[in-house]
Amino acid sequence: MALLVAGGLLVGILGGLFGIYWPFGSASAEARTTHSFAVCGMFRRTCVVDGDTIWLEGVKIRIADIDTPEISQPKCDYEYDLGIKARDRLVVLLNRGEFSAVPIGNRDEDQYGRKLRVLMRDGRSIGDQLVAEGLARTWSGRREPWC
């Protein structure tokens, strides 16, 4: 029982801290962050899922201005291979230093509960860099086939 009470207190304290400092709760908040990113494994706190989805401090973020090839359910080998390249390149780009996760538009989340953000560094979209390198497309509002 004492363990449950202590655990509840810890959750309450942490919840209060995150409520004060957590940058993702409001659609108007902008998070500036520097973290070490890797490809996601079993634990998903701060990592890259694929070319357009990351976890940042336990929050799942969909990079809102791009679409990259799928790696979890690709339609062909080309899509999978390009998706792996996009994911790996995003790891490198995110590890280059501080960036901002900027809300856009009216929607804070997509239908899967991911926060919709544009990742910005020095006034430029990190997603735009993936587009320029041929690893992503500018988001058109719907997925287009890669095969």
Image (cartoon, rainbow, N blue to C red):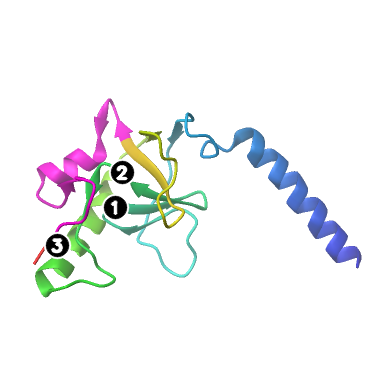
Dot 1: what SS? loop
Residue 64: assigned label: 2
Under mark 3, the amino acid is: Leu
Dot 2: what SS? loop
The reply to whether the C-beta atoms of the residues labelled 1 and 2 are less than 8 Å apart is no
- Number of on-image labels: 3
- In this figure, which residue is indicated by the disc labeled 3? 82
Under mark 1, the amino acid is: Asp
Could you give the CA–CA distance between mark 3 and mark 1, rounded to whole angstroms? 12 Å
- In this figure, which residue is indicated by the disc labeled 1? 52
The residue sitting at 20% across, 71% down in the picture is 74
- Whether residue 103 sits left or right of residue 51 in the image: it is right
Q: Give the x, y percent position of residue 79.
A: 14, 66
Nearer-the-camera pick, 97 or 12: 12
The quadrant holding residue 125 is: top left
- Whether residue 134 sits left or right of residue 12 in the image: it is left
> Residue 133 lies in magenta, yes or no?
yes
Residue 22: assigned label: none
**In front: mark 3 or mark 2?**
2
Q: Give the x, y percent position of residue 71.
A: 25, 68
Q: Give the x, y percent position of residue 68.
A: 21, 55
The residue sitting at 40% across, 56% down in the picture is 47
Could you give the CA–CA distance between mark 1 and mark 2, rounded to whole angstroms? 8 Å
Work out whether mark 3 precedes mark 1 in sequence or the reverse, and give the earlier one.
1
The magenta segment: 120-144
Work out whether mark 1 precedes mark 2 in sequence or the reverse, and give the earlier one.
1
Q: Give the x, y percent position of residue 89.
A: 22, 52
> Residue 82 lies in magenta, yes or no?
no
